[in-house]
Image: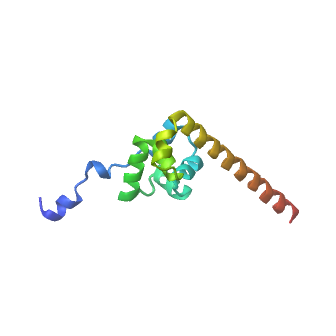
Amino acid sequence: MTRRNRARAPTDDTKPIDIRRLRGRLQLSQAAFARRYGLTLTSLRTWERRTRLPDAAARAYLTVISRDPDRVAAVFAGAEGKELQQLGWRELRAALDAADAKEAAEEQWRARLREEEAGEA
């Protein structure tokens, strides 16, 4: 095998991550998952449909999410070392769920406003 062919040989780190299964395990919608982990909804959808695969950095990030989703969400939300140590996992999950619910309610409210404005036009 030439050097060029070895570089293209598939490895474990190029296997696609089953994002839909990960979301199911976390009981999150596509929108909630994207919001919680700072991903674009469009990218998430194309990855799940496998019309496009995540690049190496995204695969690494998704792997870390799959291994410790609560801690990744907390770090992404801005929690620091002391906060992570002081927060119990139940409290952390409750805080994340409350933030997700609030954001989803705000999005529904904005959608209703847009519908009302479109109806008036």
Q: Residue 29's spot in the image, x, y percent?
A: 58, 44
Which residue appears at 66% of the width and 43% of the height? 101
Nearer to us in this view, 105 or 71: 71
Q: Residue furthest right?
A: 120
Q: Residue 37's spot in the image, x, y percent?
A: 51, 51
Q: Residue 64's spot in the image, x, y percent?
A: 39, 47
Which residue appears at 46% of the width and 41% of the height? 85
Q: Residue furthest top?
A: 90
Nearer to us in this view, 36 or 54: 36
* Left or right of 38 in this view: 68: left
Nearer to us in this view, 66 or 97: 97
Q: Residue 84's spot in the image, x, y percent?
A: 48, 43
Quadrant in which the N terminus is drawn = bottom left
The vertical placement of 118 against 20, above or below, is below
* Left or right of 71 in this view: 9: left
* Left or right of 54 in this view: 96: right
Q: Is residue 20 visible?
A: no
Which residue appears at 71% of the width and 47% of the height? 105
